Amino acid sequence: MIGDFEYFAPKTVDEAIALLSKYKGEAKIIAGGQSMLVVMKRGLLTTEYLIDIKGIAALDYIKYDEGEGLRIGALTIHRAIEKSPIIQKHFRVLSEMEQNLATIQTRNWGTIGGNLCHGDPAGDPAPVLIALNAKLKLAGSGGERIIEVEEFSKDYLEVALEPDEMLTEIQVPTPLSHTGIACEKLMVMKGDMGVVGAAVSITLSPKDGVCKDARIVLSNCASVPLRARGAEKKLIGKVLNDSLLVEAGEVASTEASPPVDVHGSAEYRQEMVKVFVRRAATKALERAKAA
Ligand SMILES: Cc1cc2nc3c(=O)[nH]c(=O)nc-3n(C[C@H](O)[C@H](O)[C@H](O)COP(=O)(O)OP(=O)(O)OC[C@H]3O[C@@H](n4cnc5c(N)ncnc54)[C@H](O)[C@@H]3O)c2cc1C
């Protein structure tokens, strides 16, 4: 049962920020409502003031420029990212990630910004965006600031937004040449939240094929999307082969401290981290070699 609240539907970012500033700490933003309505209906969250930002048309866009990279407005729905020809061409891993995120109905209404701001460590976009070294633009009454996606999640369902701030844009740099990126998640059924997931980015040196850089990010393995830095170290500076990718999965599994629920014990999830890191890394390596 949802309690009473005053409802606002600003049409610009400035109007939304003015409302957030006026009702500092007491107002809540709603975008697609795919997460908000679940927590509100369960009585886990009440608010006096609900700011519905879905009508801010200026935050619904996908733009690409090779120098500047990809810019996605916070109100862009998942389905638009999945189907975008620009993203399919230049950032295929984002489109692939979206194909397994929820159902088409949820993807047609839920926004990328809402997903990130919900701060669920099982969410799919954040690990992929961290593997892509992406940043977020936040806007508040004091102006705009940029934050790494990696720094944004603070704890379970807690993100680095001030009470008068909102997310406006996701910024993804063009990957370095000879980079391959892939993601894999374990689902009970297609579109389910991942039991565990892994996003891997590998950059090779064109000279000698040595791994110049690697990013390995896990979902649902901690209270925030987890960078498996020990596993990354296993790969960087080496000519990669299957056994190194297996080792990286094993190290990542020791770095994970996954939750326990009906879908699996912590031990089961740690075993699955080995499998899913290896699978994502194998695909990322193939792509890096072909890039
Ligand atoms: C059936 C179902 C299956 C799902 N499966 C998956 C899945 O497989 N993988 C996955 O990753 N997710 C999954 N989700 C979650 C879903 O993707 C997200 O709930 C959705 O993307 C959130 O976007 P929204 O626009 O609906 O946000 P809302 O629900 O409106 O908001 C979510 C949170 O973000 C805040 N917020 C929203 N936009 C902004 C903004 N621009 N600035 C500041 N704060 C903001 C809100 O205040 C709220 O706290 C699933 C959800 C459902 C209902």
Image (cartoon, rainbow, N blue to C red):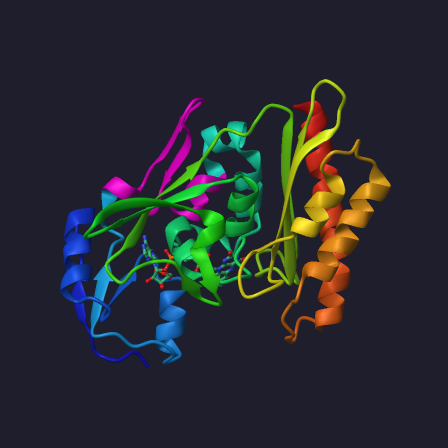
Q: Nearer the viewer, residue 187 or 156?
A: 156
Image position of 175 with respect to 120: above or below: above
Residue span colored magenta: 58-82
Q: What is the quadrant of the C terminus in the image?
A: top right
As drawn, which residue projects farthest toward the top?
207
Residue found at x 54% / y 66%: 223
* Image coords of residue 265 (percent x, y): 71, 73
Image position of 49 with respect to 212: above or below: below
Q: On the picture, is 118 further left or further right than 214? A: left
Q: What is the quadrant of the N terminus in the image?
A: bottom left
* Image coords of residue 109 (percent x, y): 38, 53
Would you say residue 12 is visible in this rendering? no
Q: Quadrant of residue 286?
A: top right
Would you say residue 252 is visible in this rendering? yes
Q: Nearer the viewer, residue 168 or 232?
A: 232
The answer to if 70 sits in the magenta stretch is yes
Picture quarter with ligand 1:
bottom left
Q: Quadrant of residue 76?
A: top left
Residue found at x 19% / y 54%: 17
Image position of 125 with respect to 159: above or below: above
As drawn, which residue projects farthest toward the right?
243
Q: Nearer the viewer, residue 237 or 248?
A: 237
Residue found at x 46% / y 62%: 154
Image position of 37 with respect to 282: above or below: below
Q: Quadrant of residue 189?
A: bottom right
The number of callouts visible is 0
* Image coords of residue 26 (percent x, y): 22, 71
The answer to if 63 sits in the magenta stretch is yes
* Image coords of residue 168 (percent x, y): 31, 46
